[in-house]
Image (cartoon, grey):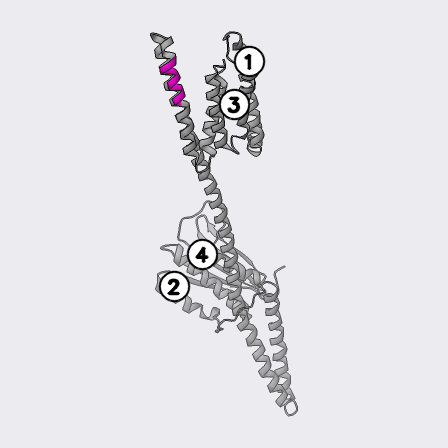
């Protein structure tokens, strides 16, 4: 089977060489038959050299049956008629060679293929009909006449079948080509949609982080002004203001580090509005309950004051996971678990809706999943999402409160 595959691949890669080999095989067999019958069919109206040359001229054009299918079938048809008129004692392999050329014209020909095939068919079948009904039948009687008529009928049938088969072959090749092109196009569209989804989400994250950084810079400006005014009269308050400036500056640098290390470079100017945090989680749960998705929230560990970017991203991840459940899980319930540790905040959103996948989690795709993954990656966290057998669809995210998880 492997050898057959390699041979088929080589034949498809070099069609002209393959057709040349086929033409040589046909030529060898035709010349062998010609030499065997030459002495048995004497006298012949032409010398042997002319018969050999004509046989070569009929068959060798098969080498170019795919590159110039219409020209080849017309030339071979005309030469075959001459071959028959001269009564050269070889008919099997030259006739089969023309049959192959006829099939190739139907399969590989251009816009005029049906007209050319029609002309070749009429000429060949017209000559065969004339030779059988007008010339040959006068030399036969009884069952021999029936055999000649059956032979004529077979000629019509085999050339008609070759025409039909060539047309079907061509239609199939065109359909396969169209499907392959469509597959490539869909793959490009899928990649482009995924790329755009990532870029859109990064732009949205950039806007949200802009709010966070702008907040820190504004605080720094206000505290710097206050420190300047009370520096001489109230040094204690000035020291307190400078401490706040130090804290805000460090937080702003951390946010900018995350932003510049991951987001795309294109700048966007959009309307900026304050963004939500986990403090609005109760309102989100109430909206989901009202929309038909019962949600249970569990808090584990001691709640901490989160950095603004962490707080915002945690809220967005919960919001997106619940929105996906509401859209895709049908009649379902969801449980949101928020787990606080000294160094991380862990989010787990589980629903019991939809069709469960076998045993392992399956990869999932979509703008919602891409967006959540981008947020977690931006903050140096860990993310996973998928269906779990016996549980439902699960989204888990672990966000570091300081720096990246090692």
Cβ atoms at labels 2 and 4 below 8 Å apart: no
Q: What element carries label 1?
A: loop
Q: Which of marks 4 and 1 is nearer the N terminus?
A: 1
Which marked residue is nearer to the observer: mark 1 or mark 2? 1
For the residues carrying marks 3 and 4, which lies nearer the camera in this image? 3
Q: Mark 1 or mark 3, which is nearer the start of the sequence?
A: 1
SS at circle 4: strand
Q: Kindly identify which residue carries mark 2.
A: 288
Q: Position of residue 401 (x, y in %)?
A: 58, 66
- What stretch of residues is rendered in magenta? 125-135
The mark nearer the N terminus, 2 or 3, is: 3
Q: Is residue 359 visible?
A: no
In front here: 351 or 164?
A: 164
Say which residue label 3 marks. 58
The magenta stretch spans residue 98: no
Label 4, on which residue?
350
- Please, which residue is most extreme toward the left here? 142
């Amino acid at each position: 089977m492997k050898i057959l595959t390699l041979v088929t691949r080589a034949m498809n890669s070099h069609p002209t060489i393959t057709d040349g080999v086929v033409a040589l095989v046909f030529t060898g067999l035709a010349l062998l038959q010609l030499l065997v019958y030459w002495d048995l069919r004497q006298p012949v109206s032409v010398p042997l050299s002319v018969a050999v040359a004509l046989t070569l001229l009929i068959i060798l054009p098969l080498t170019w049956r795919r590159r110039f299918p219409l020209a080849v079938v017309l030339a071979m048809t005309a030469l075959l008629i001459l071959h028959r008129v001269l009564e050269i004692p070889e008919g099997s392999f030259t006739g089969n060679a023309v049959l192959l050329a006829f099939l190739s014209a139907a399969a590989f020909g251009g816009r005029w293929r049906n007209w050319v095939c029609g002309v070749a068919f009429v000429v060949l079948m017209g000559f065969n009909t004339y030779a059988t009904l007008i010339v040959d039948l006068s030399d036969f009687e009884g069952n021999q006449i029936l055999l000649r008529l059956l032979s004529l009928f077979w000629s019509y049938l085999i050339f008609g079948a070759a025409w039909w088969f060539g047309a079907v072959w061509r239609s199939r090749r065109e359909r396969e080509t169209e499907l392959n092109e469509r597959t490539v196009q869909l793959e490009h569209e899928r990649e482009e949609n995924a790329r755009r989804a990532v870029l859109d989400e990064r732009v949205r994250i950039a806007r949200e982080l802009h709010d966070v950084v702008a907040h820190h810079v504004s605080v720094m400006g206000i505290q710097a002004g206050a420190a300047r005014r009370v520096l001489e009269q109230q040094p204690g308050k000035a020291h307190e203001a400078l401490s706040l400036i130090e804290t805000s500056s460090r937080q702003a640098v951390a946010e900018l580090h995350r932003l510049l290390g991951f987001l795309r470079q294109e700048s966007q100017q959009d309307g900026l509005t304050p963004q939500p945090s986990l403090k609005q989680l109760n309102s989100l749960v109430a909206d989901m309950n009202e929309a038909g998705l019962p949600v249970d929230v569990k808090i584990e560990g001691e709640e901490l004051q989160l950095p603004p970017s962490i707080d915002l991203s945690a809220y967005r991840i919960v919001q997106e996971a619940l929105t996906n459940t509401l859209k895709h899980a049908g009649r379902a319930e969801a449980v949101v678990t928020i787990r606080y540790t000294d160094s991380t905040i862990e989010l787990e959103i589980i629903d019991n809706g939809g069709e469960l996948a076998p045993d392992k989690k399956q990869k999932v795709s979509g703008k919602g999943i891409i967006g959540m993954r981008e947020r977690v990656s931006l903050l140096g966290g860990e993310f996973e999402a998928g269906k779990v057998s016996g549980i439902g669809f699960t989204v888990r995210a672990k966000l570091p409160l300081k720096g990246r998880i090692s």
